[in-house]
């Protein structure tokens, strides 16, 4: 068992945190059946697992594990613009391409087609390819602030910021579930997210659809470009606050391994 599997297994067997995130990947790593079994256990007991989709822009071949696993939520990155008082203004695909950062060609929101996994059932309505596509969702990955080693590190970027932000958002969903039901958690959100994306009115209320920008780079100069709805840069986009909290909190929830209404 790899060290990553040991860590994942501990998170599953402890079953303490109902929302988890990770930013690791195995360079050149192929599908890991042991890890997938652990991810499925995590899903079955109502935990939500978010993975950074990667910082190498558009994928042109193998997506290193677990970046295309269909059993966890893959999170891409955006550049956020705010208005007066920090209010939401707009988002575009996070891409530190050669135009702005000459030393960071291929540094942006990871996305593309898996070469290993068929489309999971929740992606059947996303008619893109015969393989699992990624990411599923996205959040802020640019101009981020980190406090580390006793100092503030400013203007940082990466989907390693976006994945834990989604985990933090999901903690708010789980908090509301406990308030409404007395117990439970939202668990694996992908089926609910793709169902929302397939419903235009729910989607427009629940998500910020990121329609500008791309994750192109010199190794993939023509792919991929953000479009309306799902795309291979930011998935379905970023959460629209309380509206998505409400919708996810009203999906079936879990108390231990028992599904409740």
Image (tube, grey):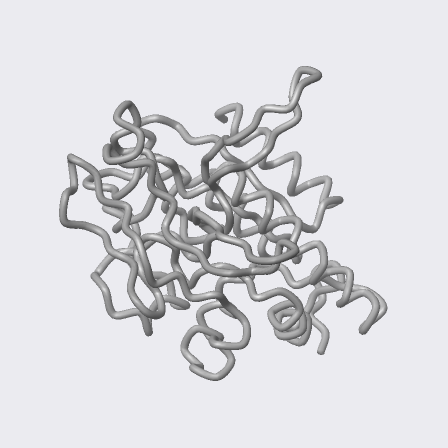
In the picture shown, does residue 136 fall above or below 198? above
Tell me how many marks there are: 0
* Near-viewer residue (28 or 58): 58
* Near-viewer residue (230 or 249): 230
- Taking the spot 72% from the left edge, 45% from the top edge, the residue there is 17
Image x and y of residue 200, in percent: 43, 82
- 121 horizontally vs 105: left or right: right
Image x and y of residue 132, in percent: 31, 56
Image x and y of residue 199, in percent: 44, 81
- Taking the spot 66% from the left edge, 38% from the top edge, the residue there is 11
- Taking the spot 66% from the left edge, 34% from the top edge, the residue there is 10
Q: Residue furthest front?
A: 84
* Near-viewer residue (153 or 47): 153
- Taking the spot 44% from the left edge, 56% from the top edge, the residue there is 91
In the picture shown, does residue 198 fall above or below 32? below
Q: Residue furthest top?
A: 149
Residue 25 quadrant: top left
Quadrant assignment for the C terminus: bottom right
- 120 horizontally vs 7: left or right: left
In the picture shown, does residue 49 fall above or below 237? above
* Near-viewer residue (255 or 137): 137
- 180 horizontally vs 156: left or right: right
In the picture shown, does residue 73 fall above or below 202? above
Image x and y of residue 112, in percent: 27, 49
């Amino acid at each position: 068992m790899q060290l990553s599997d040991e860590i994942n297994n501990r998170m599953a067997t402890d079953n303490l945190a109902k929302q988890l995130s990770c930013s690791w990947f195995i360079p050149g790593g192929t599908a890991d059946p042991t890890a997938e079994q652990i991810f499925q256990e995590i899903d079955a007991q109502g935990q939500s697992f978010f993975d950074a989709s990667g910082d190498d822009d558009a994928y042109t071949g193998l997506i290193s594990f677990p970046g295309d696993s269909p059993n966890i939520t893959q999170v891409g990155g955006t550049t956020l613009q705010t208005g007066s008082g920090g209010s939401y203004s707009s988002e575009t695909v996070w891409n530190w391409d050669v135009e702005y950062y000459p030393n960071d060609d291929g540094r942006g929101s990871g996305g593309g087609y898996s070469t290993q996994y068929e489309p999971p059932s929740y992606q059947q309505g996303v008619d893109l390819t015969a393989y699992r596509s990624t990411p599923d969702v996205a959040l802020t990955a640019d101009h981020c602030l980190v406090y580390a080693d006793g100092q503030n590190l400013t203007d940082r970027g990466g989907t390693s910021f976006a994945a834990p932000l989604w985990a933090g958002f999901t903690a708010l969903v789980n908090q509301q579930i406990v308030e409404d039901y007395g117990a439970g958690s939202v668990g694996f959100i992908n089926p609910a997210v793709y169902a929302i994306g397939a419903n235009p009115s729910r989607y427009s209320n629940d998500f910020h659809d990121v329609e500008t920008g791309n994750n192109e780079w010199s190794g993939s100069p023509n792919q991929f470009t953000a479009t309306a709805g799902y795309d291979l840069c930011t998935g379905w986009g970023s959460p629209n606050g309380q509206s998505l909290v409400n919708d996810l909190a009203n999906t079936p929830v879990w108390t231990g391994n028992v599904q409740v209404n």
